[in-house]
Amino acid sequence: MANFTNGENLTNQTDVICFSHLRWDFVYQRPQHLMSRFGRGGRVFFIEEPMPDYGAPKLNISKRDGNVFVCVPTIPPDYDTAGLPELMAELIDKLGTDYRIDNYIAWFYTPMMLEWSKYLKPSAVVYDCMDELSNFKNAPPELCERERQLFEKADLVFTGGRSLYEAKREQHDRVYAFPSSIDKEHFMGARAISADVPDQAGISHPRIGFVGVIDERFDIPLLAGIAGLKPEWSFVMVGPVVKIDQNELPRGENIHYLGQKAYDELPALLAGWDAAMMPFALNDSTRFISPTKTPEFLAAGLPVVSTPITDVVRPYGEEGLVRIASTPKQFVHALELALAEDASTRLPAVDDFLAELSWDKTFEAMSELISDASAARKRSVAAVTTV
């Protein structure tokens, strides 16, 4: 694969080869926000984890809006996994040849795909460490070693929150905190929506809602306790259930699971709620999370109550924008205060806080750092060449 013209500023011809453990068509979150913005200038080749399929190994490539090409490796179910890194490296090298990817950066969301990039010669290598993956359920035992190797290769490390930055900043010379941001216009649209959506039209008020992946980060006993204390309230849970048994979820006439919804559907759903909740468990998997839903709920005009997640307490709790509670009784009390609150006294402070927060600004700041890193790599290559 041809090398990028190292050191030039990011241009409209800059492509991105992105390695992700999250699938493009899953929940719309940080990777989709950032990669869709890269796609406005160049192309994005979004490399996903393999799927089983009989026949010769290959990349199934399909185009999405925003110049994004989703690349799903398909391999036979009985394929020897020991040979997978080399196979993937060859398939991605072929991708570069077939699509003439000459001017590009390599972007990683997972260290487990580092070996897949062995034939790449990008202008810069970025590790966007949005979560502490080693703390998640079913994390591969070799993940920490792969991350160490990625730190050695990366020109830049971005973190998904402040607490994760504090945990990683001593491991690399160029670590930058980029907490969860927001598409404000999208979610602020909820404030002007009065019509209810069919899925929740029959659900009584007050409605307290949650949007997100329901997995090991979700505090199941807490939701059960809150719902039990307030049978006259309705709790609306929106999002896919993964890595946990659905039979473990609390059930009741006042708990409603609506499943996964498209990103474009969310403002209308949120418009029909009276408050939002973030009942995250306090465990290893939530130690460093920076939930994107925090600013999204606030932009939609909702009062928010959360468990004491570090990156929610700082800054949202400290700024008085989100109420913090731990036990079912504390949560109910905080929600009672939230429901009684006058929105006209709350929203000005919310809007002031969100004024400087946007995915566009996050993307611009990241792009500037990448341009500098590309230039530094070019100078380093030139210095070696002239010796």
Image (tube, rainbow, N blue to C red):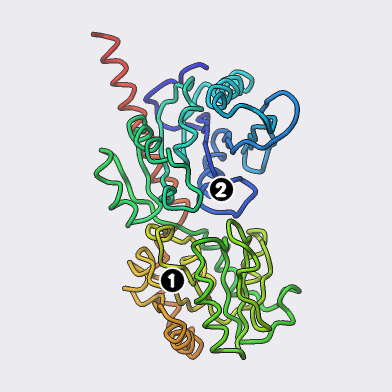
Could you say which quadrant of the image residue 194 lies in?
A: bottom right
Q: Which residue is mark 2?
A: 32
Q: Position of residue 160 (x, y in %)?
A: 41, 52
Amino acid identity at mark 1: Asp
- Say which residue appears at 46% left-offset and 67% top-offset: 294
Residue 331 lies left or right of residue 245; in this view the side is left
Using a 10 Å C-alpha cutoff, classify the residue at mark 2 as few (fewer than 14 neighbours), some (14 to 19) or many (20 or more): some
The answer to whether 334 is drawn above or below residue 269 in the figure is: below
Q: Is residue 115 above or below residue 224?
A: above
Viewer-proximal residue among 275 and 310: 310
- How much space separates mark 1 and mark 2, taking CA atoms? 24 Å
For the point 33% across and 25% down, the residue is 377
Q: Nearer the viewer, residue 34 or 157?
A: 157
Residue ID for mark 1: 351
Where residue 368 sits: x, y (%)? 37, 39
Residue at disc 2, secondary structure:
helix
User: Where is residue 362 drawn, in percent x and y?
Assistant: 42, 50
Question: Hey, what amino acid is under mark 2?
Answer: Gln
Where residue 40 sits, quadrant-wise, is top right
Indicate which disc, 1 or 2, sits on the residue closer to the N terminus.
2
Of residue 166 and residue 87, the one placed in the foreground of this image is 87
Q: Is residue 38 left or right of residue 383?
A: right
Q: Residue at x 55, y 63 (%)?
A: 185
